[in-house]
Image (cartoon, helix red, strand yellow):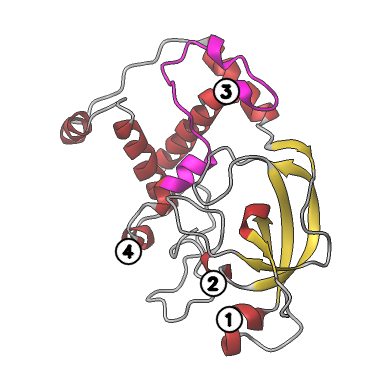
Amino acid sequence: MKLQHYLGGLEGLPEEISLEKRVFVEDWEQRIFGIHVAMMGLSNHLGAALPEYPIGEVPTAFQDQWTWADLRTGAEAMNPFDYFKFRYYEKWLGGITQFFVDKGYVTEEELAARIAKPAPLPEPEATPAIDDQVVAYLRKGDSPRRDIAHPTFPLGSAVRITNVAADAHSRLPGYLRGRTGTVERVFEGDYAYFTHTGDGIGDPMPIYIVGFDPVEVWGPRAEAGPETLYAELFEAYLAPIEEEL
């Protein structure tokens, strides 16, 4: 959640935000969405996920982990100017392509040759086991809940949001770093994040809804009125407010 993802009331942006309502603007966007879904359904972490899938028995050449966290990491790694330049699924295409290059499934030279001389792709062989696995994943999903909640902070707790060092991917909105808020809800379970981000999340932990006074977040620029900003945050991003002696 870096600058280009959570602007947090930033003013003076060069262009108005696009309100495009179509899910897919170009036909190829449907294909990149399908590729992403297939990658998630064949991700090797599903063997240890809930519900457990027999992913080791599926005859797929895809042997890596791919979750929403991996997709987001690719987008967050983009230069912010490029991020604003490309449309939604163009960002997906760039992240997925770089993943396949980094993992050795395809080379940049092969991609360049394909772009220079387009040709119809060969028809894939029928693989019912792969199709069944992806369909099962679409129906059952992948629950991050691992246990009942074991919260450190009860309802009504005043907390300060940590200012942990930024990593390749984070679920902490940048504009909340160092701000204080109040725990408004504790979710019913401890939830894992499928990737260890390096800034504290990954293992199962409680998730909270924390309420913030807009003045605390944006200072005098906040609009007047009885407003509250709410954010869902992993426990690793919360710290107690120490009482002054």
What is the span of residues highlighted in magenta in the rendered image?
Answer: 47-73
Chain-order first, disc 4 or disc 2: 2
In the rendered image, the vertical position of residue 17 relative to residue 109, given as above or below:
below
Residue 133's spot in the image, x, y percent? 59, 18
Tags 2 and 1 touching, CB below 8 Å: yes
Chain-order first, disc 2 or disc 1: 2
Mark 4 to mark 1 CA distance (whole Å): 24 Å
Name the residue located 40 percent from the left edge and 74 percent from the top edge: 15
Mark 4 to mark 3 CA distance (whole Å): 35 Å
Q: Quadrant of residue 100?
A: top left
Q: Is residue 14 within the magenta segment?
A: no
Under tag 1, what secondary structure? helix
Q: Quadrant of residue 110?
A: top left
Under tag 2, what secondary structure? loop
Mark 3 to mark 2 CA distance (whole Å): 36 Å
Name the residue beneath numbered marker 2: 8
Between circles 3 and 2, the one closer to the viewer is 2
Name the residue beneath numbered marker 4: 81
Chain-order first, disc 3 or disc 2: 2
Chain-order first, disc 1 or disc 3: 3
Between circles 4 and 3, the one closer to the viewer is 4
> Foreground residue, 191 or 102?
191
**Disc ID at residue 218:** 1
Between circles 1 and 3, the one closer to the viewer is 1
The answer to whether residue 150 is left or right of residue 80 is right
Badge 2 local density, few (<14 within 10 Å), some, or many (20+)?
some
Chain-order first, disc 4 or disc 3: 4
